[in-house]
Image (spheres, grey):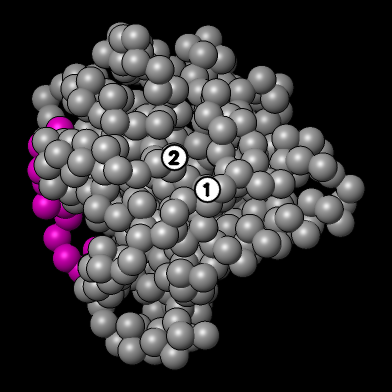
Amino acid sequence: MLFSILRPALFTLDPETAHRLTIAGLKKSPLKSPPAAGPLAVDVAGIAFPNPLGMAAGFDKDGEVPDALLGLGFGFAEVGSITPLPQAGNPKPRIFRLIEDRAVINRMGFNNGGGEAAEVRLKRRLSGHGGIVGINIGANKDSADRIDDYARMTRLMAPLATYLAVNISSPNTPGLRALQDEGALVALLDAVMEARGENPAPVFLKVAPDLEPADIDAIARIALDKKLGALIVSNTTISRPPLKSSHRDEAGGLSGAPLRDLAQQRMRDFRKATGGQIPLVGVGGIASAEDAWARIRAGASLVQLYSAMIYEGPGLAKRIIRGIERLMRRDGFSSIAEAVGSE
């Protein structure tokens, strides 16, 4: 109710300013405990998630408010993407609300304060807070050796993360998606696994929705061979379905409602390609309990959102969790694990 009153004022601000105000507000809000395990609890990659709904990477790029996000009801929060060195990202403006489409286009470019600053912040939270926090790692735009960047970030962040998410699917760092090619991906994951050493944090891989069938099969085969903890399907899209907004031709990655059908299909594709042998995290266009439930039925053990909260506000997580539980019982399932891939 409060958000519906505040939203018109927030939408008079440019999206990046509104986002910084949101982060500032979360920093100052009283911390609530992370959600307790309930009927929607699910185990993925050896981690006991209290519910399957997470905040996707991109919202909390520098790991400033993961505990505040957990206090909103999210079963887990994924921070980042964080790169070894600080970088400013792409020139502004670089994020656009497509209000008529309930969508966002961004070309942020991995703007963040760098690994060392995030390490201090995330190390501090470990001493006083529980809850599941994934750390999404990336490479610097001007790096001479991007695979080495991922290895460096793995060494730095694995001790602080419940899981590590290797992001090779942002469309806003030139050449980054080339790491999804088979040979490059094997080399990258070998470097990450070696850098992780004996640390128990499982490695998740975040992939793009703009993949050909052969790419999907190759990534699935490599993920199984390297014993990844999960695949995150998917990032923003560079494709453009029909859009109404005046910002529809802006360059960057499209997220929100227009991504839903493509991301749903990619979930089905990866479920088929992996034979259900590796957990999948569904992201893209999830804005309701029905969207989340459809993604779970298509093969997702976990789901994430971000863009929908721009339009629906901070109460969205708890509404979706309540709705998923209702839908699970309506369809005769006793657990999330039982429903995964059941469509």
Identify whether 282 is placed above or below 31.
Answer: above
Q: Is residue 103 visible?
A: no
Identify which amino acid the numbered label 2 is placed on.
Ile
With 53 as the anchor, is 314 left or right in this view?
left
Residue 310 % position (x, y): 43, 70
Label 2: element kind: strand
Q: What residue is at 51 percent from the left and 58 percent from the top?
A: 73
Q: Which residue has dot 2 on it?
A: 132
The span shown in magenta is: 83-94
Residue 9 % position (x, y): 33, 89
Label ID, residue 75: 1
Q: What residue is at 70 percent from the left and 62 percent from the top?
A: 323
Q: What residue is at 13 percent from the left and 30 percent from the top?
A: 143
Q: Quadrant of residue 150?
A: top left
Residue closer to the observer: 284 or 25 = 25
What predominant SS class does the magenta segment belong to? Answer: loop
With 47 as the anchor, is 153 left or right in this view?
left
Q: Earlier in the sequence, mark 2 or mark 1?
A: 1
Q: What residue is at 71 percent from the left and 52 percent from the top?
A: 293
Identify which amino acid the numbered label 1 is placed on.
Gly
For the C terminus, the image quarter is top right
Identify whether 310 is placed above or below 10.
Answer: above
Label 1: element kind: loop
Q: Quadrant of residue 152?
A: top left
Residue 228 % position (x, y): 49, 19
Q: In this view, which residue lies farthest toward the front?
A: 128
